[in-house]
Amino acid sequence: MPDNAAQLERQNAALTRQLLEWIATAPRTYDEALETWRSSCPRHTIWEDALEAGLIDARSASRLELTVAGRAFIRSGS
């Protein structure tokens, strides 16, 4: 468990990167992403945060895609 807000932010950025890379490596569906990335921990809302930040295009339930912002997030090393 992170000791402070900065550690939590770094941990969440790493998990967000992992989620985006997971989506980028193979075709993923909305249902598959929810099953794999759901969390009951209120401090780790990676899936929800990525959607809210506009990093993932989830308009099609049959295929998720990274947005321009999502691809930039991966390239930035955030």
Image (cartoon, rainbow, N blue to C red):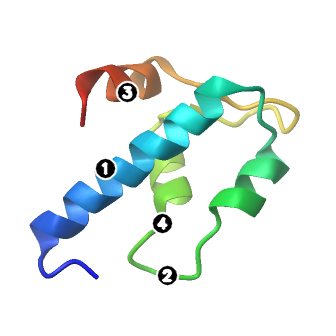
Q: Is residue 8 among what the camera can see?
A: yes
Q: Earlier in the sequence, mark 1 or mark 4?
A: 1
What's under tag 4, amino acid-wise? Thr
Q: Estimate how packed mark 1 is, as few (under 14), some (14 to 19) or many (20 or more) residues with alpha carbons within 10 Å.
A: some
Mark seen at residue 13: 1
Q: Estimate how packed mark 4 is, as few (under 14), some (14 to 19) or many (20 or more) residues with alpha carbons within 10 Å.
A: some
Q: Estimate how packed mark 3 is, as few (under 14), some (14 to 19) or many (20 or more) residues with alpha carbons within 10 Å.
A: some
Q: Earlier in the sequence, mark 1 or mark 3?
A: 1
Residue for point 42% across, 47% down: 16
What's under tag 1, amino acid-wise? Ala
Question: x and y percent of residue 33 in the render?
Answer: 72, 50
Question: Between residues 26 and 63, which one lies in front from this camera angle?
Answer: 26
Verify CB contact (< 8 Å) between mark 2 and mark 4: yes
Task: Give the CA distance from mark 1 to mark 2.
Answer: 16 Å
Identify residue for label 2: 41
Left or right, 45 with reference to 8: right
Task: Give the CA distance from mark 1 to mark 4.
Answer: 11 Å
Question: Between residues 7 and 59, which one lies in front from this camera angle?
Answer: 7
Left or right, 69 with reference to 35: left
Identify residue for label 3: 74
What's under tag 3, amino acid-wise? Ile
SS for callout 1: helix
Q: Earlier in the sequence, mark 3 or mark 4?
A: 4
Identify residue for label 4: 45
In front of the other: label 3 or label 4?
3
SS for callout 4: loop
Residue for point 45% across, 55% down: 49
Verify CB contact (< 8 Å) between mark 1 and mark 3: no
